[in-house]
Every structure is written in structure tokens, then in C-alpha cells.
Image: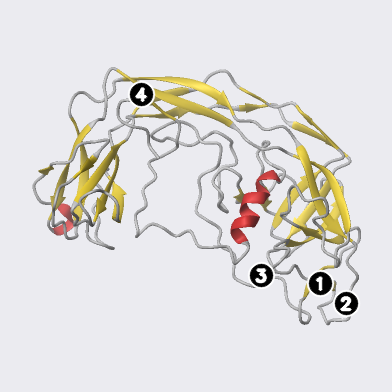
Amino acid sequence: MLGGPDDGTQTRSSPEVRDDARVARVGVRVFGLALVATLAGACNLLNGSADLAVGDGPGGGGGVLRDGGGAIDAGGSGQDGSGGKNDGGGDTSDAGPDFVPDSGIDPQLTSCGTNLICLPDVAGWTPALYVPAAGQKNPCPTTYPQANTLQQSGGGGCTCTCSAKNGSCAGSVTTKSGAACGGAATDFAVASGQCSPVVAELPLPVSFTAKPLGTPPSACEASVTSQLNPPHAGTYCTGAVPSAGMCAAGEVCVTKPSLFTGGFACIVHDGDIACPPKMLFRMQYGTTITDGRSCGTTCSCAPEPCAGSIEAFSDGACATSVRSVSVDGTCIIAGAAMSGSSYKYTPSLGCGVSTPAQVLGSETYTGTKTLCCGIGF
């Protein structure tokens, strides 16, 4: 969450606004949360952060399974610490909408029988299983009995932290209602950084705009923090015995991951190479990884219009949330009304990253293995 109005610093990429109309993050099946958390150790194919990259070529494609936010991205920028232009400094994960896999078997990976799945059968590729079982001595199930423990990227990135100078966004907000929120601006008696016991009827449409008590920040300072993590051991499993199930030409039938292992159905190949069709995610392992990454010493921040978020509560003590929306003048026309018995306004810092922190250098692999995975279980 955003820092209080008087702390002077901010390291998040944006206000965490839980607007019901905008929340689209969907569960990634029964085991998805554990899988997302564990895949924080997957290798970065772009610039060193722990990603399971979407795409079929070396270097990854569009989206990635990020370690920073615990969500699956599709269409991130591929630049650690960029964070874009935001309210609080660079983040170590890319921005982008969530990639939400279908439940059960991925549409591209077909079933060949009960607890069986068809994988590409291409020369040089071996069926494999990525199991999120960090810390276990034997994470491989009996259907994929051979544990292969190599090195993976530690991931991470470089963060640019902004500090506001010569001003503050602390204050209150104004509201506008009427058609397209075109009515006159009305003061709303909430104070930033605290619970305001205000009973209000705020049907939609309505908009909120920041109203600083004093002068907004006119200058910003910036500092770089390294959040680069060293390479670490990671395991994938092989040794699956082909089954007699029927698959299309160029495919092999093997046991699919179970709900108990919660893994990805994968194939593995020596070297840094492109993934064959139908395998959406790609990551790398190495016999050794030499980490030559570092953070650049400079980044920059610049003043931005004051914004933030406001949250409505059904009780008078800010305990039971109704809805949280942006304080940026956006006209809210759908979802729950912002009526409540108390409110909490969290202002933005008033500074955003204008030049992100940069990851310099790269990780060098020896004995590279490329693991390409689908999403079926």
C-alpha cells in the first residue's frame, strides 16, 4: 500500500486500488497459488528476473510468470525495475494484464486417457515435470522419478525510490456527480492518512479528485536499491514412461501432473533453444550460472499530479470495505456505489519515476537446459 502522507518516500509502482470493476485476477486452478509462489525461482530469459517466459524463442515472448507480484503476466515490458511512470518508484516486476490459464488441460495440450496428456514428441526433447516443491529432498513423483537439480536465476531487479520535496499531496478530496460526472466539484470531508467517520450517500456516477492542503511537490529525489537475488538450485523431473494412449502424429502420451504434485507438464532439451508449438512457457537451467548483474547507480523522479485512492466502508470504523477507487478524476459509472459510513483516503506521493533504475550486465550459463511447459494437469 501507499505510504502515509508524511513519510516522504514511496517504493510501490502505483496505488493499490481494489476497484471491483477493475479486479480481474482469477485463480490459477486449485494448486495455482502455490505454483505461482514457487515459480519465483524460474529463470529470467529477458534480463535476469525470475520468470517463466511466455514465447517460443530464446529470450521469451510476451508475458511472464513474475516472482514479484505472484501473478501471471502477459505482455510485460521485459524491463526489470522499469515500473513505468508511476506514483512511487520502480517496481521489480513488469506491468501487464494477468494471463489466466483455462482450468484442467490447456486447450493446446490434449488428453490421451485418464490422467494422461499428449506432449510434443520432437527429436532431442524429453518429457519432464516442473514441480513446485522447493526445499523438499525428493520433489519428483513416481511417474517422473528422476530428479534433475541444476542452477536457476535468482531473479529480482533494481528499484527506483522517489522522495517528494517542497510540497505534499496530503489533504482531502472533492467529488463530482451527475451525468458523466459533469456536476460542480463538492468538498468531501475526509482527511488523508486516517479513518474518517463520514456518513455519505454517493450513488454512481461519481468521481474523486485530490485536494492537497498545501502546495503539491515541486521537486523529487531518487535513489536506486538493488533487489537482485543470486542464482539458486532448482529441480525438474524426468523418467516418464510413454503410455499407450492415442495422440496426434508428432506427440507422445505420458502421465500428466496430478493435483497433488501441482506441476507443469513440460519437455526439456539441451542448450538455449526455441520451444516447439503448444508449449506456452519457457525457462532455463544451467550446470553453473555466473551472475554478472548489477544495478545502475542513477535513476530519476519527477513531480506528478496528486492522486491516490479512497476506500468506502459500511461501518464507522473503516473495518468492512465496500469499495476502493482511484482519486484521479475518473468518472465511475459501474459497480458498487461509494456510499458508506466511513472512508479512508490514501494520497499519492506526487512523484513518479521518469528514468527507471537499470539492470546492468547479465547471467552467464554453462550446461544450459531449456524447459518448455504447457499448463495442463
Quadrant assignment for the N terminus: top left
Residue 337: percent from left, percent from top? 22, 60
The reply to whether the C-beta atoms of the residues labelled 2 and 1 are less than 8 Å apart is: yes
* Disc 3 from disc 2: Cα separation: 19 Å
Report the amino acid beneath label 3: Asp
Q: Is residue 6 left or right of residue 362?
A: left
Residue 328: percent from left, percent from top? 27, 43
* Disc 3 from disc 4: Cα separation: 46 Å
Question: What secondary structure is found at the residue carrying circle 3?
Answer: loop
Which residue position holds label 1?
255
Question: What secondary structure is found at the residue carrying circle 1?
Answer: strand
The reply to whether the C-beta atoms of the residues labelled 1 and 4 are less than 8 Å apart is: no
* Precedes in sequence: disc 4 or disc 2: 4
| Label 3 CA crowd tier, 10 Å (few <14, some 14–19, many 20+) | some
Question: What secondary structure is found at the residue carrying circle 4?
Answer: loop
Q: Which mark is residue 8?
A: 4
* Disc 2 from disc 1: Cα separation: 7 Å
The reply to whether the C-beta atoms of the residues labelled 3 and 2 are less than 8 Å apart is: no
Does 226 sit above or below residue 333?
Answer: above
Residue 372: percent from left, percent from top? 76, 56
Residue at (30, 25) in percent of width and height: 6
Q: Which mark is residue 243?
A: 2
Q: Nearer the viewer, mark 3 or mark 1?
A: 1
Report the amino acid beneath label 4: Gly
